[in-house]
Image: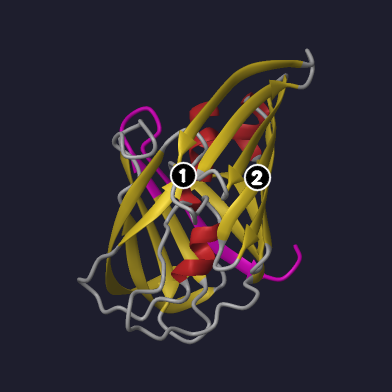
């Protein structure tokens, strides 16, 4: 069960930037979006996303059977400089009896990211790492904002810089149009796939997909992570917009 909830933050890692010559809509504030998390046909948790051009927050809380076996309450915060260049992030993670904090500082002057994980209960540093990055690099939430600026057609792909503070890579994407039904309604969407796993940025094997409405609003209405056993497929679907 723990692996399921640990995998969910990867579902927000589809990262795109505006291609040369294209003119997408201005992202503005994405606002507050609430998602239901499904795993093996059961309600595994809820995710609340609140992002704009300067900062973003993702809160993930386990529910039902998953929460009864292994409670998870994670909050991820990030800060940006335009155009969605990450400057710093913090993950406050309460999983079971553990309480840890992971901080990433993106130094744009030195083109480097520094990653520190702390055990807050023991008040000690567990691990540190650093990696060279481009002058502007995207984190896991900044990509959702940049994704909304795309106007490229299905079948096209791009390459953008992404880092989790420990590794950095150039990430490729692909897309096609699909209709998607969620608790918030049925939407015409464009499906994106981000090549982030399989040792690119994340070591675990799997595939990441994001469905974004094919209109001026560009709302991510469905996010899916497909991984091998024991996780399998985890899906986030838009439940509603606004505060929950």
Near mark 1 (Cα within 10 A), the count class, few <14, some 14-19 or many ≥20, is many
Which quadrant does the C terminus fall into?
bottom right
Q: What residue sits right under mark 1 in the picture? A: 163
Near mark 2 (Cα within 10 A), the count class, few <14, some 14-19 or many ≥20, is many
Using the image, tell me which numbered label, if any, was put on residue 122: none
Q: Is residue 236 magenta?
A: yes
- Under circle 2, the secondary element is strand
Q: Is residue 61 above or below residue 160?
A: above
Q: Is residue 106 above or below residue 81?
A: above
Residue plotted at (58% across, 53% down): 86
Using the image, tell me which numbered label, if any, was put on residue 89: 2
Q: Is residue 154 magenta?
A: no
Q: Is residue 144 left or right of residue 226?
A: right
Q: Position of residue 117 (x, y in %)?
A: 64, 25
In front here: 175 or 127?
127
Q: Earlier in the sequence, mark 1 or mark 2?
A: 2
Q: Position of residue 238 (x, y in %)?
A: 55, 65
């Amino acid at each position: 069960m723990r692996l399921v909830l640990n995998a969910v933050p990867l579902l927000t890692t589809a990262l795109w930037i505006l291609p040369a010559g294209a003119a997408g809509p201005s992202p503005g504030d994405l606002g507050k979006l609430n998602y239901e998390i499904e795993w093996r046909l059961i309600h595994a948790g809820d995710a609340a996303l609140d992002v704009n051009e300067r900062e973003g927050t993702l809160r993930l809380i386990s529910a039902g059977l998953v929460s009864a076996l292994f409670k998870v309450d994670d909050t991820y915060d990030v800060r940006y400089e335009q155009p969605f260049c990450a400057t710093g992030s913090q993950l406050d993670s309460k999983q079971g009896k553990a309480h840890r904090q992971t901080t990433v500082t993106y130094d744009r002057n030195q083109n480097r990211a520094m990653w520190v994980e702390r055990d807050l209960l023991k008040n000690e540093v567990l691990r540190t790492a650093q990696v060279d990055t481009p002058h502007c690099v995207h984190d896991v939430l900044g990509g959702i904002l940049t994704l909304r600026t795309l106007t490229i057609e299905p079948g096209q792909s791009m390459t953008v810089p992404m880092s989790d503070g420990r590794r950095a890579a150039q990430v490729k994407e692909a897309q096609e149009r699909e209709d998607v039904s969620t608790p918030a309604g049925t939407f015409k969407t464009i499906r994106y796939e981000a090549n982030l796993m399989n040792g690119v940025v994340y070591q675990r094997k799997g595939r990441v997909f994001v469905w974004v409405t094919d209109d001026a609003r560009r709302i991510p209405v469905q996010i899916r992570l497909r991984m091998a056993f024991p996780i399998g497929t985890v899906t986030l679907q838009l439940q509603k917009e606004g505060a929950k």
